[in-house]
Amino acid sequence: MKRAMKTAAPEGVGQGSAPVATGRVTRRGVLAAAAGLIGLSAGVAGAYAAGIEPQGLVVTRYAVNPLGWPAGRKLSVTVIADLHAGGPDMMLPHVRRVVDTANLLKSDLIVLLGDYIARYRFATRRVPDTMWSAELARLSAPLGTWAILGNHDWWYDLVAVRRALADVRIPLLENDAVMLGADGQRFWLAGIGDQLAHPLGHGRYRGVDDLPGTLAQVGTDDPVLLLVHEPDIFPRVPARVALTFAGHTHGGQIRLPLIWPAFVPSKYGARFAYGHVVEGGRHMLVSGGLGTSIIPARLGVPPEILQVTLGV
């Protein structure tokens, strides 16, 4: 941003010369000045959205006590969503900082909610799959690191993403449910396939998600945590699930007043765009994610890691 400059008064002014005439204020002049200020503000906001906010990182903490989770059974979960590793805003040093920050939280469980790669139109540089996956392999939690896939993984390089996660031994849940925890602290972790896996054209998709089949694997009365990439499935999630974790929306990514819900990638608009959603006693947390999609910019929703504590 250019620094405002002050100039000295011309010689003779204030030294017995005739008064300097002042300009008449006109409606056109006011509008021109306003337009200039708006243009300047837009330029500053654009520079911030493209060059500063995407490089940030915050930890957003939630304490949740859903009905389906036993009272007093404490569990901490770190949530990493929408990494979108690649340039210009999620190069290897930023990925490394995400992993370092997540490990400092010392949660019981770490979950990855898909979209590991950046392949959109304005992605300028690639981070090799072996490099971002090697960083994710450093994640450490007593109950492990578990992953699902997102729509970008399916659309752009499914085989490579699956291989990258397998090579670093991060288990992938695709319509699967596993039991975790010690006796008296057990719970089910379920993860479904992506809901937008196969584009059919004209805004239509065929998913590979099987929510009923996944929950049919839950064979005890222990509580259930569900991992989904897109939050749009939430109206179909039964009360049997204590808490659903979702990503995909990036929290809107560019949160401009009034217009941003129209750009949230969800048929429900702002309803499931971001944060803690409670409907009919059912709970979902939607992460704002880390990387970018469509355009390499963020405004009003900085890259975030979630730390969620249940049973407090």
Image (cartoon, rainbow, N blue to C red):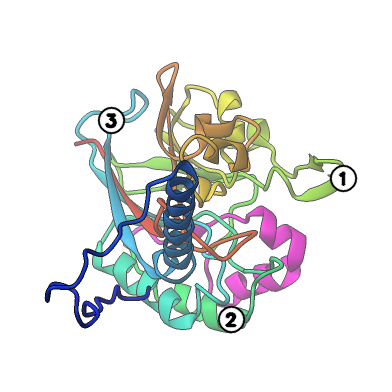
Residue 135, horizontal then vertical, whole percent = 45, 78
User: Mark 3 = which residue?
Assistant: 65
Among numbered discs 2 and 1, the one appearing first in the sequence: 2
Which label sits in the foreground, 3 or 1? Answer: 1
Please give the label number shown on residue 200.
1
Please tell me which residue is depicted at 55% across the width and 72% down the height of the picture.
85
Q: Distance between the residues labelled 2 and 1?
A: 29 Å
Label 2 or label 3, whichever comes before in sequence order: 3
Q: Around disc 3, counting alpha carbons within 10 Å, would you say few (fewer than 14), some (14 to 19), or many (20 or more)?
A: some
Q: Position of residue 280 (x, y in %)?
A: 44, 16
Q: Give the range drawn in magenta.
A: 143-170
Residue 65, placed above or below residue 190: above
Give the alpha-carbon distance from disc 2 to disc 3, as whole Å.
38 Å
Gap between marks 3 and 1 measured at Cα? 39 Å
Type of residue at label 2? Val
- In this picture, residue 294 sits left or right of residue 55: right
> Residue at 39% across / 40% down in the picture?
187
Q: Position of residue 204 (x, y in %)?
A: 82, 39
Residue 237 drawn at (x, y percent): 56, 27
The residue labelled by disc 2 is 127
Q: Which residue lies furthest to the right in this view?
A: 201
The amino acid type found where label 1 is placed reads Leu
The C terminus, quarter of image: top left
Q: Is residue 110 above or below residue 117?
A: above
Is 83 part of what is drawn in magenta? no
Q: Which of 226/50 is in front?
A: 50
Q: What element carries label 1?
A: strand
Taking the spot 75% from the left edge, 65% from the top edge, the residue there is 156
Could you tell whether 263 is left or right of 311 in the image? right
Quick one: which residue is furthest to the top in this view?
280
